[in-house]
Image: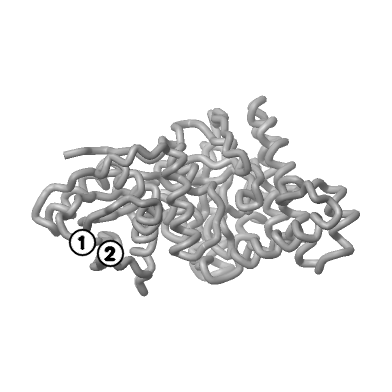
Amino acid sequence: MTPSANKPKVPNLLSLQRMVEQQFVEHFKTAPDFLVSSPGRINLIGEHTDYNNGFVLPAAIDKQMNIAVSKRQDDELHFVAADFKDSYTGSVQKLAKSSKQWPDYINGVLKELQNKGYRLSGMNLVVNSNIPAGGGLSSSAALECCVVYAMNEIYGLGLSKLEMVKIAQSAENNFVGLNCGIMDMFASMFGKKDQAILLDCRSLKYEYIPLELHQYSILLMDTRVKHSLASGEYNVRREQCEMGVRALRKIYPQVLSLRDANRAMIEYTLKDTVPDLVYTRCKYVVEENLRLQVGCEALRRNDLVAFGKKMFASHIGLSKLYDVSCPELDFLVELAREEHAILGARMMGGGFGGSTINLIRKPFINEVVERMGKSYKNRFGQEPLAHICNISDGTQVTSAF
């Protein structure tokens, strides 16, 4: 079993772009105005810290969302999800949530633009993707970034990349109903080939950090456990963090978010004043911010061994303190600990399923994937899906007609 053998055959980026154009022409009998591509993302370390105004270290990857889109002269919306063989029709004047869910990410962006005073007409749109859905790679953020970028081009709105990121985030918060932070959209929009993004989620200052992997690769192991976060535990975690902040502010009014807290505040103030679950959630966030900063120093000196140790430590915190892992994710990380070729591994994304991210020596990829896949199948009855990721550029127009 190799990374290419145990996953579905998917088109590469160039063929996906050609395909989405062809699908648009076949469906709407005319050429689109624009093709836009937006990447999925990985996060090397710094999970669930973004909505706590902390630090994250994401990177855009060569798994992409692609849309072909054109403006209509009426108010009608016609969307086609080529991967799902599904379609949606609606009106730009009556944007509403759909039982199909996937149109909500598009309509949410349109709604946010309307709320900012932009007048939009109807549109025709086709979307396809090779981002593994449910694998924790933020396919939803990629779609939102595609749509807002396309609207900016079609209507000449003059929005900056950061303004587009904020609109995409608001769409997910307000329309979809997932109270996520800004990281996913920021990484998708600002991604840069062979660079990670050290993002301060409070100030939104960022810097690119070279990912000098050399003989190493980024391997994702998808548990094939799908998660749905919008109505569940993700929002609960955010509420628990906010409860901790409110408790801290009674003594430390300068604490506006967990970004402002330190270990002493958590251990000597919060521990005895809030429920245990609130304490452990806040403890994890504060420690994860510290881990990320130490991890970035390791990357700056190209010490991948030290960085890998921080990845393993991050997973322990996510699993034991923040409680967003699952048996399948924990099992894959424990298998990774036993592999000499893997420097670090942890669950990635919102949790409750999805993928682990592994830093692995290139010559051993196939045998490690084979070994881990067999153990996983013996335990859970199916093989995980393996994906090798390369770091790519962010959202962009790929063709204009």
Which is nearer the eye, 133 or 107?
Answer: 107
Which is nearer the eye, 334 or 182?
Answer: 182
Q: Which residue is mark 2?
A: 93
Cα–Cα gap, marks 1 and 2: 7 Å
What SS does tag 2 mark? loop
The quarter holding residue 107 reads bottom left
- Relative image position of residue 204 (x, y in whole percent): 57, 39
Q: Which kind of residue does numbered mark 1 sit on?
A: Asp
Residue at the farthest left position: 29
Left of 290 or right of it: where is 103?
left
- Relative image position of residue 272 (x, y in whole percent): 89, 63
| CB within 8 Å, label 1 to label 2 | yes
- Relative image position of residue 355 (x, y in whole percent): 53, 56
Residue at the image position 83 percent from the left and 50 percent from the top: 252
Residue at the farthest top position: 301
How does the figure colour the protein chain or chains? one colour
The first of marks 1 and 2 along the sequence is 1
The quarter holding residue 84 reads bottom left
Residue at the image position 72 percent from the left and 50 percent from the top: 256
Q: Which residue is mark 1?
A: 75
